[in-house]
Image (cartoon, grey):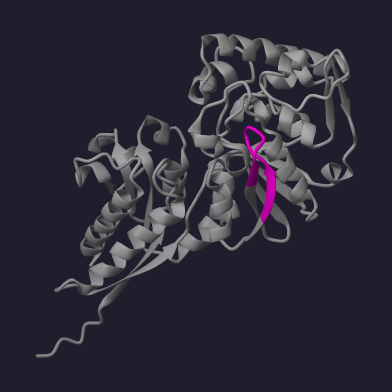
Amino acid sequence: MTSTAVPKTVRTLIAPDKFKGSLTAGEVARALAAGLRSAADVPGAAGAVQCELLPLADGGDGSVDAAVAAGFTRRTYTVAGPTGQPVLASIAFDGTTAVVEVANTCGLALLPEGKLEALKASSRGFGEAILFALSLAPARIVLALGGSASTDGGMGMLAALGYSFRDADGRRLYGSGRELVQIYSVHRTALPELTDTELIVASDVLNPLLGYSGAPAVFGPQKGAKAEDLEILDAGLEHYVSTLAKAGFADAAALAEHEGAGSAGGIGYACLLLGARQVSGADYFLDLLDFNTRKDSCDIVITGEGSIDEQTLAGKLPAAVARRSGNRPIIAVAGRSLLPKERWSEMPLTRVYTLTEYTDQDSSKDPELSASLLRRIGTDIGRSLL
């Protein structure tokens, strides 16, 4: 008898974060999709896998790429890189909302030859990118703060947006961690566009600007700060806050203690001074990229990031994806997992696949190997679904 059964089509939503140091979220999604689709060609496969790709970000580096992948238009503009060199940066814009990120304007990855400059690096390029975004007359700008090279409290960003910082001799300061302690006076020039535009900081970093959990102490060493540099940055930021308060910024001291003020080397603090509203990065970007609508038309959700660990459970992007996916099976793919199988249900996850299960080599800095392994994992996931 001839079977009349109709081969099934499994609809998957592939919604990963980046694998930091290796692949962007888009590259992760494409590699997994290639493997999933190939599973239908395996003898005995009883159907096909339909893939919808939704590369994600949580408000850090990769946010512009994620917005573009979801339908925003990429706009490019030359800004000052972390040490002043010209950098061709990009923002995302959909006619109403602009997404601007630190990582592709003045981030760690843009340092010439990868040389860390804990004191010299500046956030000025980020401010210049915000100015460019304002020229498009958006209703709101989403400020993505991950991956910064500087610990300047956002001084460089504010300098680009009309704040004049001068030393005791009246010389205008460019804006850097080293210059913080040199600030003698601060003058603000009104920028009408900022008044008419909503600023949103999408971040899940909760550190204050100063103290043992502040920007220099927690993030400074990642940016090359030695012990003596940390002392300079701590003193500089304290002086910076004090000078702003004396210059008439009544909430300068209170905002330094605010959760998130220490994000991106203190750029979070400068954003708060500008009146920015803080939201959860993971949830905001899931809303911005219309995750809820997209997952409703899918049978399976596949998410992931470079490492599945305790921080993931604390609310990173894969946990937010899992929380919003309802009763659908949720599969996570990661470079590595530090969570034992018995804890998968805490997100909850049906299955976790890791690159470390497929190779003994270190794939964390090898994009080609990572992509190849993800295609293999995608094929295996596809076979299990069919």
The C terminus: image quadrant: bottom left
Q: Is residue 38 left or right of residue 295?
A: left
Q: Is residue 78 magenta?
A: yes
Q: Give percent across and percent down for residue 366.
A: 33, 45
- Tell me which corner region of the image, top left, top right, bottom left or bottom right, holds residue 319: top left
The N terminus: image quadrant: bottom left
Residue 214 shows in this picture:
no
Q: Give percent across and percent down for residue 355.
A: 26, 45
Q: Is residue 281 magenta?
A: no
Give the camera-side residue of 164 and 293.
164
- Tell me which corner region of the image, top left, top right, bottom left or bottom right, holds residue 122: top right
Q: Is residue 4 above or below residue 7?
A: below
Give the camera-side residue of 54 and 186.
186
Magenta part of the chain: 76-87
Q: Is residue 201 above or below residue 212?
A: below
Give the camera-side residue of 8 and 214.
214
Residue 205 shows in this picture:
yes
Number of numbered discs overlaid on the protein picture: 0
Q: Give the residue furthest to the bottom.
A: 1
Q: Is residue 304 left or right of residue 149?
A: left
Q: Give percent across and percent down for residue 384.
A: 21, 61
Q: Give percent across and percent down for residue 100.
A: 65, 46
Q: Is residue 4 left or right of residue 332?
A: left
- Tell me which corner region of the image, top left, top right, bottom left or bottom right, holds residue 305: top left
Q: Give the residue furthest to the left.
A: 1
Query: Residue at left 22%, top 58%?
Result: 380
